[in-house]
Image (cartoon, helix red, strand yellow):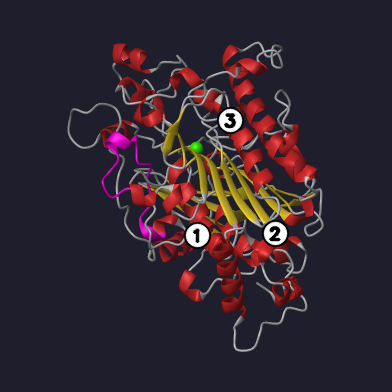
Amino acid sequence: MGKDAHPGLSCPEGLTRRDFLRAAGRLALATGAGATLLPRWAWAVEPRRPNILVILADDLGYADTGFQGCKDIPTPNIDSIAAGGVRFTDGYVSCPICAPTRAGLLTGRYQQRFGFEHNPGPESHAAKNFGLPRSEKIISERLKALGYATGMVGKWHVGYRPELTPPERGFDEFFGFLSGANNYLPAAFRGQRNTILRGMEPVEEREYLTDAFGREAAAFIDKNRERPFFLYLAFNAVHSPLEASPRLRERFAGIKDPKRQTYATMLGAMDDAVGKALGKLREHKLEEDTIIFFLSDNGGPTPQTTSRNDPLRGYKGQVYEGGIRIPFAMQWKGHVPAGKKADRPLISLDIVPTVLAASGATPTAEDKLDGVNLLPFLKGEVEKAPHDRLFWRMGEQHAARVGDWKLVCRRGQPPELYNLAEDIGEKVDLAARNPGKLKELQAAYDEWNARNMPAQWVRQDGLTARGAGTDAERFDRLDRDGDGLLTPEELPRPRLFKRLDRDGDGLISPQEAEAFAGKGEEP
Ligand code: CA
């Protein structure tokens, strides 16, 4: 946090700036009525801390929004965030799947630092030690300590145990569900996996789930408009299962492919819900007081949902660009330029440090954040890229981006090297022609990886409960090229293949394998 963000700030005698802000936060909490009751002297020195709205989409591909070039499914509300702020062309998440990305986003640290490397699988099959450890401070806990009203709406997916649920992790309010996926139609909100919770109490929800999340987000903003708030709006849209919004069938009647049409209604519903939240900010004239981030948690699983990652190679589950580079935009009207495109690499881990800087909390070296404060870069105060190197690791695949160069390593395959400036689609492997560059990236990766923990759990679910090893390991063994999908060559049992391949696209996804085992969807 630079001094310049709060000109004229001077702390009362004997207090460090940090102590002062903490005291102000505690006072706000103690009054129970929020920051509006802070003493006059506090406001004299401290401008209002900005509200924070983090909107996370699920399994939304790089080309799935209007601002990223999607033509057949309009997303005007989501696009307005990019138009009113900055679009990040080279915005990444820290994992190509759901839960680890969320652990990184909420902490501002590469999740491998604390062993959060894999999805848990459904609650009934999750490893006992699964979850975001309490020793890692998360964004809601940090902002609550500053006096923010904190709310979460949507999919949690970083802990099932009671002490790891949103109400125990700094969220005053929680409406959503704990697992990695859910149905959208109210008739299906039953059973352990699908229960919708308010606080931790099951509720009877009657709306299409994405509509309900929009309603709850708007209500939270309404209720907390007078004080700084943090809202983490984590849609499960547009993750499978493909369940159309009945309300939007008509809007997308022109899309002939039924799967695409269903997907369009899911995305349209999310855009409407985003519009509800943004509308509340406009209604209460809070746009200049609110930092908004919009991003997806991983690339699109195209074969399952029709999500699109073009021009990128690969899908959700892979460390090719299509798995990790996502639609990403940020808006802070009056503070960050509008309608700008930022094309330097940055990552979801940057959200926490950026938010902390804007809200007046200075991270210490002890926090060991891997992300950086983006504000100086976005305001043009700093010329260089926020990151000169970024890294990914998930099981037996890993990747590194150093400048324009990208290293991709997949289990059992020789390392691949691409130049993204010339070859965004990772089509031409330059490893053999550039052994020096390859070595440089491998060394950078090794250096980064030396500070990571081993994965603290593996998925406990997958193909079938029988057989050697975990089911996920069986899937991975069959998946010889490590692309997260099984081809007929990899599973040369035609009758079994046909039964597993529910959507008949000639590939078996982990979700389809999971469904076959009767355990629900693996996010
Ligand atoms: Ca996801």
Residue behind mark 3:
212
- Determine the main secondary structure of the stretch shown in magenta: loop
Q: Residues within 10 Å of mark 2 (few under 14, many from 20)?
A: many
Q: How many marks?
A: 3
**Residue 100 visible within the image:** yes
Residue 410 horizontal/vertical position (percent): 40, 44
Which label is found at residue 50?
2
Q: Is residue 77 left or right of residue 510?
A: right
Q: Secondary structure at mark 1?
A: helix
Residue at 58% x, 76% y: name it: 18
Q: Earlier in the sequence, mark 3 or mark 2?
A: 2
From what the image shows, is residue 107 above or below residue 504? below
User: Which mark sits nearer the N-terminus, 1 or 2?
Assistant: 2
Contact between marks 3 and 2 (CB within 8 A): the answer is: no
In this view, 193 is above or below 296: above
Horizontal and vertical percent for residue 452? 38, 61
Instruction: Give the CA distance from mark 3 to mark 2.
Output: 26 Å
Disc 1 marks a residue whose amino acid type is: Glu
Q: Which residue is mark 1?
A: 141
Q: Residue at x 62, y 58 (%)?
A: 33
Would residue 343 be counted in the magenta stretch?
A: no
* Front-lying residue, 371 or 419: 371
Question: What is the x, y in percent for residue 374?
Answer: 66, 62
Q: Residue reaching furthest bottom?
A: 14
Mark 2 CB in 8 Å range of ligand 1?
no
Binning the other alpha carbons within 10 Å of mark 3 as few (below 14), some (14 to 19) or many (20 upward) gives some
Region rendered in magenta: 113-131
Dot 1 or dot 3, earlier in sequence: 1
Tag 3: amino acid:
Ala
Would you say the beta carbon of the disc 1 residue lies within 8 angstroms of ligand 1? Answer: no
